Amino acid sequence: MILGPSLGQLGSIVGSRPWLWISMSLLVGAMSFTSLLLNPPKTEFGFELGYTTADAPSIMEMRAQRDFFTDGKEGNPWYQALFAEPRDSKKSMHEGKEYNELKAFYRRIKNLTIRYDETLGKDITYYDLCGSTCNLNELLFTTEEWSFFGMNYPITKLLSYVSNIGKHFYHVRTDNATGKLLNANKAMLVFMAFYQTKEVKSDLTLYEEVVQYAVDDYNSRGNSSLILTLHGERGMSGAVQQGMSHAFEYLGYGVALSVIILFGVLLFFSILFSQLTIFRIIFLWIGAMIVPLLAFITAFSIYNFLGYSITPLTIFTPFLALMHGFYTVIMLTHTWLSDSELRRDSRDEHLLEVFATCMPSLIVTSSPAAALIVCLVYPIANYAAVSFLMGLIMSFVIVFSVFFFSPAMLIICPAQDFTPLPTGNNKEVVKPTLKKVESLRDCYCEHVDRSKCVKIVAVVLVLILLVVPVYFGCTSVEGNLDYRQLLRPDNPRNYGVHLMSDVVWPTWFSIMFFVNKPPNFSNPKEYGRFKSMIAEIEEIDGKLPSDTDMVWINDFCRHTGTKPTDDALNMTQFKSFIEDFIYKSWKDGVKYEFINDTTPVITSMLHIVSFQGTKSLADKARLFEKCRAITNKYPEFKTTPFDTEIGFADIILQVPLVVAVIPLVSITTMFIVSTIIIGNLSVAILNFFFVGLLYASTIGTVSLLEINVNPFNAAFFLIIAAMSPSYTTHFCYYYQQAMRIKPRAAKRDRMNEMLRKCFFPCISSILCAFFVFLPCMFSDIDIFIAVAFTNIVFCILGVLIAFCAQVFLNMLPDMFTGTHWFCSPQS
């Protein structure tokens, strides 16, 4: 109650000059909109930067990969995969016409003209872009040429040489006795390059487009033996954009539906209190819609002015403005109309009373804004930025509700300036609809106050929520993302994701270990430590046999007739090994220099290890963590594991902490503010408990239903945390306020007064929030379906927990919910 009088005075100031504050609000909105036109926001929809902490292991690991292949030059990796499968399912990709067509097609697309460079005076092809990675697939073709009696899988022996072809063939059938490859239903060829400039990046994107045209042309031929599938960044980006556009249509339907619900709410209020004509309702409805619009535009203009970009995390922030804005204006409208017939000396006095009545609890429900703004210091840049934007949005919702909607409401729905004091002869006129509502409210309050069954149900419900969604659900929260969740089911890019996620990863998932400071292989002690590290890696679940590892040491030992398990290696023979006709290909996998032209020093090397059973990004992330734990035990080798998804794996690993830390700060801030404003510790603790329970049970429930956290829905979980106080705070605040108004009020009367002031605003706000995302349940994009379902769970749990909060307030002794901060004396 500390802020009640002060906020009341603010209402009086606003009410005394309504047109001034409306004009100033519109001016601020116009200036914000103009700033966005003059300085258009940047978009960054990639996940390369800003989604992990600055010290995330993947940053160093990606740098190690780049440095190894570019000799320390700056650059970013680019990848592309070409899949092939025979049209005739009885044929195989490892031999015959199918293999020859794949080889010919591969040779052709590497020489396709990307564009003509006038400066260089020549056609640009893939060979001008790939650098040291041009020959990634050549070992397969060399192996096939030298395999006169067929290839074995996954290791093929060529005289004294050994070749690993496991990563190229999938859905294979082999001879159990000899290991000979009998049939391979799918084949994969990999393209990789590093780009330092936007021009090279543009050329690589254009190259993918050129290859896609070639793939489409090949597949359209009736006489071709293969079905080709290209999986690359450009194609996936376009498919994701198509999916987003489709989902945004449904989000638009949701906004329209919520706006219609808002109109229905205002119409219901007019019937309930027998006030407002249809024209007044329409004008008030328009004013209510302008509030979230002004709040978002102003907040986003500040966000943009400070240099922040539009990211996938900002997709849902306009809906925070919509939900919080509608919720705030509904509460203000209801408070204004419910007391509009009380005696007032002026309109601004009425607004003073409205602000003094409901604004303190609105401040509490908006208090997460302060925490979200402070979370700008969170160590993950993009989450900090979206948190800051959400804090600004919630702040400006309150600002424009006070300085735009409140004076607009005063003008559109003027209250009576004065009514005579009632005398004994006057009879209070009760409106028919309101009388029915009051009768139902009295019955409900009586039932809650006297029924033990109601109290038992509330306690049992809270215990169930604590045990099932909170304990079991929250402990099972996992970060994960399937790229198909972002695509429409009929998009052809789904098949490329399927091949990569369901075929390649589970069968042959390779992790590159870059050893940046290799041991002296001639030194038994140093080499022994290195072998210990490799032995620990061999023990990881899902590790394929060691003979499938791709490392120069295995071939070196074959060349020298020794074994990798020997105490030391005879490095004097390294020069003859690295210059061998076959083994010279290892020059791309080991960096070395010679002392006196005879003694080699290995400066860095690549060790490729393969696993099976990896089915998701979450599996990859767990596998990377195991690899890191091992390599960190041997710091002298400076070994870094790497895969093309390692950056996203770190994003997946860190996102669960985001949806725990920022909401915790937000809800804790709300508790501190509510303790101050409510003025009673017991009620504030009860509110804090139920707000935390609502958020935790929501995230726990959807986790039990196998909805994982990812960068796309993480921002929505932050929105849930920001909106959670709205479900219980008003009930706690008005229950406490009822005691201050009438110190000896019975519990039933306190509940009645509480519900009179906030039941309809709260339930109406929940309806508006519920319908915002409901249409997305019928979209084709899984990630938006998951968000819509999460919102439904949140609203349903919010209603249940709001009921429990009412019952628990009734169960608390009056001494703990009285007017004193902790314990009120009882007469």
Image (cartoon, rainbow, N blue to C red):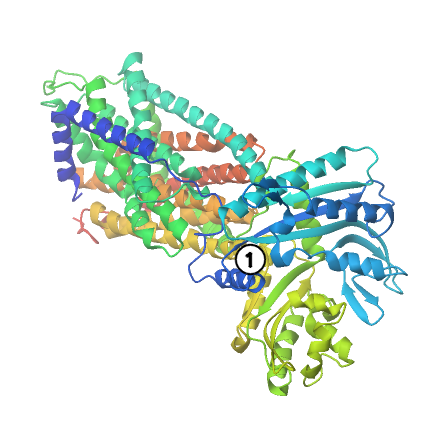
Residue 748 relative to residue 145: left or right: left
Q: Amino acid at mark 1?
A: Ile
Residue 222 relative to residue 364: left or right: right
Residue 33 relative to residue 108: left or right: left
Give the quadrant of residue 575: bottom right
Q: Tell which of 279 and 600 is nearer to you.
A: 600
Q: How many marks?
A: 1
Q: Tell which of 558 and 703 is nearer to you.
A: 558
Does residue 679 appear in this view? no
Quadrant where the N terminus is found in the figure: top left
Give the quadrant of residue 23: top left
Does residue 760 appear in this view? yes
The image shows residue 78 at horizontal and vertical percentages of 58, 51
Residue under the point 52% across and 76% down: 635
Label 1 neighbour load within 10 Å: few <14, some 14-19, many 20+: many
The image shows residue 164 at horizontal and vertical percentages of 75, 63
Residue under the point 55% across and 57% down: 646
192 shown above or below 121: below
Please give the residue where the numbered disc 1 appears in the rendered image. Answer: 646
Residue under the point 23% across and 35% down: 399
The image shows residue 509 at horizontal and vertical percentages of 67, 58
The image shows residue 400 at horizontal and vertical percentages of 25, 32
679 shown above or below 548: above
SS assignment at label 1: helix
Residue 662 relative to residue 490: left or right: left
